[in-house]
């Protein structure tokens, strides 16, 4: 892998807009994918004037998680900089873990008088725990366990039985096992240090579990907590310094704001609608060189297996958002996804993702007159890895100098 | 290069069939390659419902040997795990070298009274040595040299002047020079240890040459032996454990059975005909998750420069074998070659190899209605390296989990 840090950066005033449609790539239900089925005249018109390609997020055959896929697109090797599950959940809850903050996915569970787990999700008469109850229990825990041995404890409720715990204090490390044994009928496991420097972190995590069980004592259900995916945020080189870009992120969903914040982008406040996102872009357009703007709902439709909904969302995006993106006339406009989420697979997949790059300097090809998987397969960019996106955008913005004499 | 061991394996009951047509790729004699010339309606029909691509066995411009090409397709970096020539010859002779067994290509040669090589191939009146004579001399050597200093000596005759020697015993290592100086008019070289731990192996090899010369003494010709390509088998991580697959190999030729055994596949007994190979697949289909099935003859026709023969073999394969492969309805069916052997080049080549992957989850493209080099160049898979084949097959069998959070 070429080390792109060897390329000199030549700052200028050209603007780059990177649009991520989460889970964009698809598979045919009959003979066409979601994007090929959708009536997207604005994207098609843009495609005719752009370079197309197919993007491999991480590696051939590899289905990426959202964190890994985004880091790759931002130019970070996701193997070198792994984002732990606990960190991703913390970001998704709107937490802002700093270096050294240990994050865990947590959930309420039910144990019997012998300490054996009878329900890993603390259901009530077979029903999922209510969000309200989870919020109340999290409040109780945060009140009873404000800190452990000098480590601040932050607790944020999630959906149903889920919540996030963040431990903030000196000397914390990752390399910790889960306390969740993964099935009912077993006793919870102690969190174990998988490397010596994580010893203190394991003690803190185990003490938290002990104190939480004490606080929940006497309850028939939801009387225990399980921790998984304990992790520190990766120490990432700063994106703005790396590319010498004033970089802003716009995302309605907290996890994506969090990922952008992790790499050091400025996260712009915005509402939850697409209109709010594009308005935020328009209002701040003069003040930054680079914008990452994220649209989530395609991925959800794919995960739900709702082909028609994904098609409809793409049509909506084409109608409501694309004309406003184009109207800004960014010097470089890139539209792609972080990964594929084909409705027929009901989940993330390993397939390539349609990629469109518009700039005055791309080789436009004449094979395709639409934006879709098939057109992108034949696109002039060919096969692009996620980690090659930023270099291509920098090059098209003429912000990359010459390599070598 | 991404480390695919980072991807979690999720075993299931989906079946993968990997079909290798040895030397499949070709070049046009006039305007079409061997595969494009062949009338292969079954392959063409399959191609319409499959993803096509072009496979680079090792790297751009690199013509691979059979061992290296196969290892790459099985998912092993052939640079990290070199298969020495001696090992490959031993496998081809049906030997089963274990870890620490030192293998050498050997041949009978003729030296004069001063020990100068007059003929590296021990020809008789300009004629190649007869196989029968080679077998007799090998028998003589094995009788006279059953072991050297606690090291068992196994000798297997090959074609003409060629044979294979395998040394089995403790403390053997590779890193040895050849005794063959490569031209007539020179004296044979001593086998030299190229690293300290190979010292004992060099002594054993040189002692073998000395004892062989003694046994052959008094003969006018074929009175000496030369050793080349001394090597131990690479220590390969087990394929079945690596991919959590019950993996079986079907190959009429010993070398390919040997390569499969080296990586830890179960080698199924089968006869020498294609029908015997496909019958072996059919009979064992229920008992394994993964099948590697190898068909050799295309490569031989290519090596012979026999374009028409290669075309005919492809047509035969299409008629006799493809319908039976398709009838098994494997969840993932991959048809490709280990490398190209264009008849016009009369040998292995560096060209990309046609690749077809059929599964419910491939992006079928509608550009091509045939299986051939040109169709594959435009295929939806684009350019695939040999080492990426297994990940793609695993992904299509949904046996690869998600990478990263």
Image (cartoon, coloured by chain):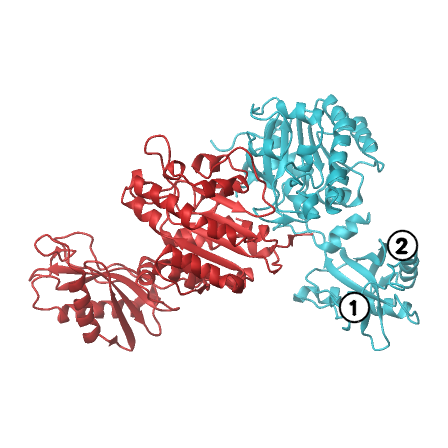
Chain colours: A cyan, B red
Question: Residue A306 location, x and y as percent?
Answer: 75, 43
**Residue at image x 56%, y 38%?**
A4
Query: Viewer-nearest of labels 2 and 1?
Result: 2
**Residue designated by label 2:** A131
In depth, the one of A48 and B326 nearer the eye is B326
Cβ atoms under marks 2 and 1 closer than 8 Å: no
Q: Quadrant of residue A49?
A: top right
Q: Secondary structure at mark 1?
A: helix
Q: Secondary structure at mark 2?
A: helix
Q: Earlier in the sequence, mark 2 or mark 1?
A: 2
Q: Is residue A261 visible?
A: no
Question: Residue A361 location, x and y as percent?
Answer: 58, 23
Q: Is residue A207 above or below residue A74?
A: below
Q: Chain of mark 2?
A: A
Q: Quadrant of residue A144?
A: bottom right
Number of other residues with Cα within 10 Å of mark 2, as a class: few under 14, some 14 to 19, many 20 or more: some
| Residue A206: mark | 1
Q: Disc 2 versus disc 1: distance between alpha carbons? A: 25 Å
Number of other residues with Cα within 10 Å of mark 1, as a class: few under 14, some 14 to 19, many 20 or more: some
In depth, the one of A23 and A11 nearer the eye is A23
Q: Is residue B244 above or below residue B30?
A: below
Q: Is residue A53 visible?
A: yes
């Amino acid at each position: 892998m070429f080390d792109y840090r060897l390329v000199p950066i030549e700052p200028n005033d050209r603007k780059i807009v990177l649009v991520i449609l989460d889970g964009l790539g698809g598979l045919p239900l009959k003979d066409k994918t979601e994007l090929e089925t959708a009536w997207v005249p604005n994207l098609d018109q843009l495609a005719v004037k752009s370079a197309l390609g197919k993007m491999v997020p991480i590696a051939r055959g590899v289905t990426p998680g959202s964190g890994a896929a985004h880091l790759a697109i931002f130019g970070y090797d996701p193997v070198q900089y792994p984002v732990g599950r606990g960190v991703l959940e913390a970001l998704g809850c709107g937490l802002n873990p700093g270096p050294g903050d240990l994050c865990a996915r947590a959930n309420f569970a039910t144990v019997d008088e012998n300490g054996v787990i009878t329900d890993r999700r603390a259901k009530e008469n077979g029903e999922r725990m209510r969000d309200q109850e989870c919020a109340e229990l999290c409040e109780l825990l945060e009140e009873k366990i404000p800190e452990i041995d000098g480590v601040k404890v932050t607790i944020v409720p999630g959906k149903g039985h889920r919540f996030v715990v963040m431990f903030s204090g000196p000397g914390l490390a990752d390399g910790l096992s889960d306390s969740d044994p993964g099935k009912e009928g077993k006793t919870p496991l102690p969190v174990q240090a998988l490397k010596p420097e994580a010893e203190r972190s394991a003690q803190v995590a185990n003490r938290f579990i002990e104190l939480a069980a004490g606080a929940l004592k006497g309850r028939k259900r939801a009387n225990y907590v399980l921790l998984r995916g304990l992790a520190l945020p990766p120490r990432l080189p700063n994106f703005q310094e790396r590319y010498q870009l004033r970089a802003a992120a716009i995302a309605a969903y907290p996890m994506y704001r969090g990922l952008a914040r992790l790499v050091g982008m400025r996260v712009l406040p915005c509402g939850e609608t697409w209109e709010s996102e594009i308005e935020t872009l328009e209002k701040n357009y003069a003040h930054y060189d680079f914008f990452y703007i994220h649209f989530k709902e395609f991925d959800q439709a794919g995960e739900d297996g709702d082909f028609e909904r994904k098609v409809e969302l793409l049509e909506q995006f084409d109608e409501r958002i694309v004309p406003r993106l184009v109207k800004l006339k960014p010097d470089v406009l890139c539209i792609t996804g972080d990964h594929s989420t084909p409705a027929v697979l009901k989940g993330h997949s390993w397939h390539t993702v349609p990629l469109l790059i518009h700039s005055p300097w791309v080789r436009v090809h004449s094979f395709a007159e639409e934006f879709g998987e098939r057109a992108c397969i034949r696109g002039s960019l060919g096969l692009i890895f996620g980690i090659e996106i930023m270099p291509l955008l920098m090059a098209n913005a003429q912000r990359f100098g010459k390599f070598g004499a």
